[in-house]
Image (cartoon, rainbow, N blue to C red):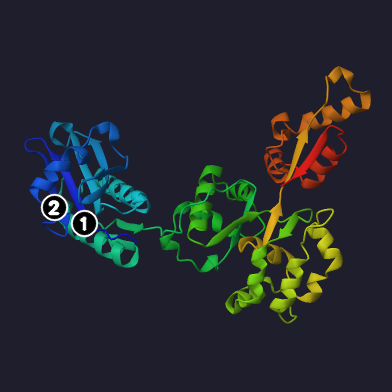
Amino acid sequence: MPVIEAVLYSEFNVTLGPQLVFQSPPDFFSKEQFGNVDKYLISKPELAGKVLTVRTERHRLVSCPIHIIGDRYPRNYLLFNVAAVFAADVDVAPFEPVVRKLALALRSVELETGYIVGEGKSHLQRVLDSVRWELNHSGRVDVPIDLANTLRLQIPSAREVCPQVELQEVPVPLVDLKALPREHLDWAITEILPYIDGANYAKAIAERSEVHIAIVLKALSCLAARRLVAMVPAFQFHSLYLVTREVGRLLVDAEFQRQCEHFTHFGSQPCLGAPALFELYCSFTPRDTYWTVADFLERHNCPKLGVDVRRFIYFGVIHRLLRKVARHPIRDTGGALEDMKEADIESFERVEDKVPAQLLEGNHTTDQICCDVEISFRQLGELLDSDPYTHFFYR
């Protein structure tokens, strides 16, 4: 992870112009160096709240200018900036949300208490020192700004690129979510945690928690980035899976074997050993017709074997031992509506009433369609299977 070489606080003085007020460590930037970048740090009000990156010959600065209007300030406005300084050749993307959060936190405290224009400003040096030191050594900081406000920041690691989450995906806990310290979680995550059980999909979590779906998707993305949950396709008995070459890892990696045995174990029976689990995964091999989970269960009595089939499938998907085969419906009437038989017209209209035509162009999976129109897979299957103009392809 790149090292934060310095943290800067600068502001616009109506008499002297842009001023570097605090920096950690002290005297890191000379007056001349600051003069080379001050116009980018103390920028126009239109850029307030935006993350700006400036590169010099030796450094790369990630900053966030803040503009506050109020009659307590000279000329009725306050313009300041918080910036983190790095070596010129490093990837600073993971630090951009951290710098923005720091700047917005200072803005919030200033609006509430007049922190920057009052006595609180004298504590900014301590805050900047803590931010630089703790982020460099632990990747997170938890420091009081004043008696009523605490600043909490965390740097996402390189692997913590927030993934896109789909409405129909299910968050599967990878740790004991109940044991997470609530003081380090934001409101949205604490609201949805009770509904993350490995069965509820994202849209259902939003409905049951009464949290806006966009906020739920972002919260789940953050949890997935931190490897607290894994986002997987919803478990359905009709789902189709194929084994991948990664399954061979079950035969050579002892620690991975133990993880698989523990994750998939069910009931009071002894854990099924890795060789037997390997054989079960290999059951999902390509055949003339794809093999669903229901077909798999007809041949293997998983409860009797001490295997939780849902977690067995989830473990396979999370670790890429299995790949879900998506089912895409596509509709082609083959001609004008007036040329159809009466029975075909009735079938056509039944589908039209339930499923918008744009969902049957081959770009959406059956899982996505079920989630979007809020019907079960069984209902969708009966509807589409009875329609002679709807066909399926798999990928």
Q: Residues within 10 Å of mark 2 (few under 14, many from 20)?
A: some
Assign a secondary structure to mark 2: loop
**Which sits in the foreground, 152 or 391?**
391
Distance between the alpha carbons at the discs numbered 2 and 1:
9 Å
Residue 190 visible within the image: no
Q: Is residue 294 left or right of residue 361?
A: right
Marks 2 and 1: CB-CB under 8 Å?
A: yes
Q: Residue most toward the top?
A: 338
Q: Quadrant of the N terminus?
A: bottom left
Q: Report the residue at 70% width, 67% height from top.
A: 312
Tell me which amino acid carries mark 2. Phe
Q: Position of residue 43 (x, y in %)?
A: 22, 36
Assign a secondary structure to mark 1: strand
Tell me which amino acid carries mark 1. Ala
- How many numbered marks, from 0 up? 2
Q: Report the residue at 64% width, 52% height from top.
A: 201
Residue 142 in the image: above or below residue 19:
below
Q: Position of residue 275 (x, y in %)?
A: 72, 77
Residue 185 visible within the image: yes
Q: Kindly identify which numbered label has been placed on residue 29.
A: 2
Q: Which residue is mark 1?
A: 6
Residue 104 in the image: above or below residue 255:
above
Q: Is residue 72 left or right of residue 338?
A: left
Residue 148: quadrant of the picture? bottom left
Q: Position of residue 389 (x, y in %)?
A: 84, 32
Residue 357 in the image: above or below residue 306:
above
Q: Report the residue at 83% width, 70% height from top.
A: 301
Q: Report the residue at 23% width, 32% height from top.
A: 44
